[in-house]
Amino acid sequence: MKNQTPVISVDVNGKGASLGDFYGIFFEDLNHAADGGLYAQMIQNPSFEFGKTDNPNYDNSTAWTAVGGADVRFKNIGGIFEKNPWYAEIAGETGCGLVNSGYNGMYFEKGKEYRLSFFAKGAMKIAVTLEEAEGGELGRAELQLTDEWARYEVTLKAAEASREGRLGFRLLEGGRIALDAVILLPAEADGIFRPDLLAALKELTPRFMRFPGGCLVHDGDLDPESRASCYCWKNTLGAPEARGTRRNNWGYNQTLGLGYYEYFLLCEKLGCEPLPVLPAGWNPHRRAACPEYDMGTWINDALDLVEFANGDTGTVWGKVRAELGHPKPFGLKYMAIGNEEVGEEFPPRYELIAKAVREKYPKIKLIHSAGPFPAGSEYKRGWTAARKAGADLIDEHYYTSPQWMLANVDRYAGFSSRKPKVFLGEYASWGSTMFNALAEAAYMTGLENAAHAVSMACYAPLFCNVDYRNWSPDLIYFDNHRVCRSLSYYVQKLFANNQPDSLLPVAAEGLGASAPVVMPVLGKLEIASCGAEGYISDARVINLDNGDTVSFGDMELKADTRRVLSDINLPDCEFRFRFTKTGGDWRRGMQINFGMKDEKNRLCWDIGGWQNQDCMITSTVDGRGTCLDQVLFTLEGGREYDFCLRVQGRKITTLVNGAAVNRCEDKIPEIRDLYYTAGKIKATGEVVFKAVNLNPRRFRARLELGGGAWKGKMWTLSGKLEDENTFENEITPAEKDFSAARGGLTVDFPAQSVTVIRVKNGE
């Protein structure tokens, strides 16, 4: 009997959950996303404020080079900016000076103009030049300075192109000058935003932008005046040269040239909702907490931010906004308090801030934190606290293997439609290949189909300057003159550009049923130190079916110990041992690797992980790790522990001193014939159908839409699983016109592809 073509029927007159502000973007200044990235300022270390607080290799001269025998000294007395006191003093003969190399060189386009401003003093004539790396001039202007500090502005035009350009200051007579606050912007920059990167953001049509982080928000001192403080939005306002510089927790300096006012302007340019994230007086990285009785500063920062964004010009902070150039309110709707907070210290501080905001601004939607993992005690603590506090949304974060996403496509299907709704504020699969993009797209169909419980989602991170990489993967890669949109970028673009307002019911016939793969955890058992030292005793594996035991006896754990104990071929077993930590790095613990095929394919019980704060189960597939369960735990020195790892099929339990700690399941995905979702755009009446085919063959199905003829467009992104976009070669979605006669059409979904169909009836 001939196989029947599967049929997918979309009820175009049905009504499902609304999507609202579903797809957005997340901006954090890591990978030099702001300084050296979207912030079009071309000068690195513009006010000579770089220092070892930012990076051990930094000093006042970072990115600056003396030329022509100049005597350059850096001073912090007699300057003009209280929060940025340092400036450069340049002395020498005619022709000597100081040049800045920007971020691994500046990019000058032939015939393009560049706006330069700086502060200087010294009664002499100087030349400012656009230069090639070897010193040849591309543009030049001469200015007469005065004895007193003053601001100078000039436009320079590049006669030739250069990818390794510099900006130079040179004395035209012997003597001495002082220099500070140098800003160089392309004249065509949209405000202060780098045009090509801004264009890439606009193409995503985000509904919201989450900013300014990320761990950048809370990883710092609790003193707002400290250079290494948590992110304090009030310190980012005013003239860029007067804003106090700060340590960026990603290992470099943050000039704050992009501050809160600029982030709000950026949201306005993108036509999306601003979603600021505020610290809550608790730094989980350093376990530093503001006393609850002294939370006034943090509460007022939240209240004042709403006033800054929404207040009229008669309010204190509304007036500040107007003086910055924006009398009209920004219309803030959302506010997140905390980012990936873990520990019992966060919930009461969240409640103090939330209570004050709710009393004064009841329409603001408040967002709680669920921590940095998709499961575990801190994840549960976050949800419990968010419900108790009446949060509107809860911010979930996780970075996983693509296999985890495929095994958990329906993660949110059973979640409640009651508040708090899910805000997936950071997520991505490890890697930038087509396989990653397809797995993310399949997962996103699950997010849309769970719109009753999921309200918002944004991939992270957003930007990466390839010359200053802190984190990978990222959505958009760039250097000083090029942009590379990743395959994940095009998935996000396809889904966001074609976001429906509400879901439509879908029924399918003839698609292969999906079932979980039953495969027990089998492989090598290994014990490894992560820096801890101590003694292991009575190590043994127990067969849970018959009680048979294999003993490994006692052993000493050194800081470099890594020992395979056995091959475990039992579907149900326990590994038990006792351990006493006697030395080594106090911030480190140990690992039990199990089900280990090789280094890139294993499960791991991490005891005393990340700064000795976690007890965690992770799954690594093809070198890509996923946290399956996490619990706060500190491995104390001098104390004997009784540890037990229990594996039953793919279910994993850990016990410490007889008490269960971790409970999880390492699911293996069964690839479906097709992952899909459908919805309707209210304003146009268009129907959107999205489908992902992860199989190595095309999938043909009959798409039934009902009614008469349908016309519109189809976009398809496809390729080999190992494909990856580069500066030299970008794989982009193919677009073609689409029509469906008599209410339906047979569609071939290409092998390993994402397909989006957007049609309207009766045209």
Image (tube, rainbow, N blue to C red):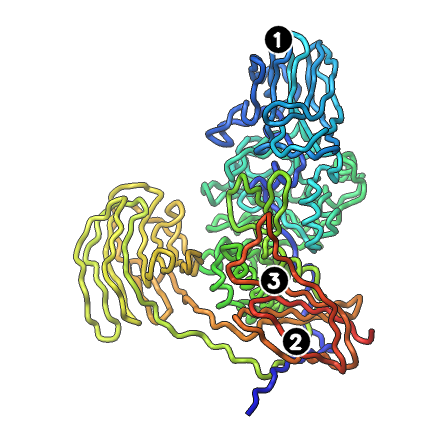
Q: Which of marks 2 and 3 is nearer the N terminus?
A: 3
Q: Give the quarter of the figure containing the N terminus.
A: bottom right
Q: What element carries label 2?
A: strand
Q: How many labels does the image show?
A: 3
Q: Is mark 3 on a helix, strand or loop?
A: strand
Residue at position x 31%, y 44% in the image: 531
Can you identify the residue that label 1 sits on?
93
Q: Give the quarter of the figure containing the C terminus.
A: bottom right
Can you identify the residue that label 3 sits on?
421
Cα distance, mark 1 to mark 3? 67 Å
Question: Is 742 drawn above or below residue 648 in the view shown?
Answer: below
**Res 256 → quadrant:** top right
Question: Is 437 drawn above or below residue 696 in the view shown?
Answer: above
Under mark 1, the amino acid is Glu
Dot 1, how many residues are within 10 Å of its Cα: few (below 14), some (14-19), or many (20+)? some
Residue at position x 64%, y 44% in the image: 302
In the rendered view, does 328 fall on the left or right side of 459? Answer: right
